[in-house]
Amino acid sequence: MVTVLGYGTTGLSVGQRVFGLTDSYRGGGLAEYVAIEARNLAPLPGDVDFTVGASLPMPGLTAWQGLFDHGRLQAGQSVLVHGAAGSVGSMVTQLAREFGAYVIGTGRAVDRQKTLDFGAMEFVDLENDALEDVGGVDLVFDVIGGDIQKRSAGVIRAGGTLVTIAGPPEARPVDGLAIDFVVMSDRAQLGEIVRRVRDGRLRTNIGNIATLDDAVAAFNPTERISGQTIIRVRP
């Protein structure tokens, strides 16, 4: 899926600024014009920059749906967020904190300060710290998969939940749930997300902005980029 921005979409006012997701089977987001169903779009307030708008749907909806639709997060619970310095993980961290959760972020050593700046209370260096020392969290939000995902099931309390976007879970918490999901567009949730950006409760995490001519190189970087890549179709 690719974030798209446009005007004059059926079901919305003509000339209205909008943002949202294309359907996964359509593609075509890196284009000057794109056909998209109105149900996949939400109004983009005039005081929100298009670049900011483009950075919100994929990570914002993924975080929202993983935490609330699938993870059933409740205030006072503890959440372990893998890849907490990334575009999805940083959204997960901020939303979980806002809803009263205790957040532990993971990543590489270089991600520590960025993870804490986005609101995590603790940081786990996956290259040097023992993940198993975390223990007893209510919810794990996984964006990594593989061995990390499998080991994460063991740090969830009985009855807790593992939510992942990295493929079908190989393990599940004791008496709990393991859920693999694919993000879906939702106009109401997009509205909740952009509202939080406007009032300062939610910050974007943009790692790189490139032109359409440089899109291939931008999506195949020679060095690691922490944050989302945004392509400007027009200057």
Image (spheres, grey):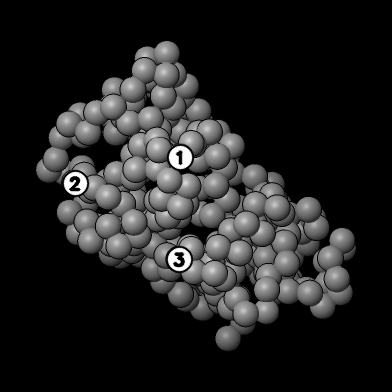
In percent of the image, x 41 and y 24: which residue is there? 160
Q: Which mark is residue 203?
A: 3
Task: Say what amino acid the circle numbered 1 marks.
Answer: Ala
Q: Is residue 5 left or right of residue 37?
A: left
Mark 3 vs 1, N-terminal side:
1
Q: Is residue 176 above or below residue 52?
A: above
**Do the residues under discs 3 and 1 have CB atoms within 8 angstroms?**
no
Task: Say what amino acid the circle numbered 2 marks.
Answer: Asp
Task: Say what amino acid the circle numbered 3 marks.
Answer: Arg
Q: Secondary structure at mark 2?
A: strand
Q: Is residue 51 left or right of residue 122?
A: right
Residue 115: x and y, percent?
29, 56
Q: Is residue 229 left or right of residue 9?
A: left
Q: Quadrant of residue 138?
A: top left
Badge 2 is on which residue? 125
Q: Is residue 33 above or below residue 116?
A: below
**Do the residues under discs 1 and 2 have CB atoms within 8 angstroms?**
no
In percent of the image, x 31 and y 52: which residue is there? 120
1 vs 2, front mark? 1
Mark 1 vs 2, N-terminal side:
1
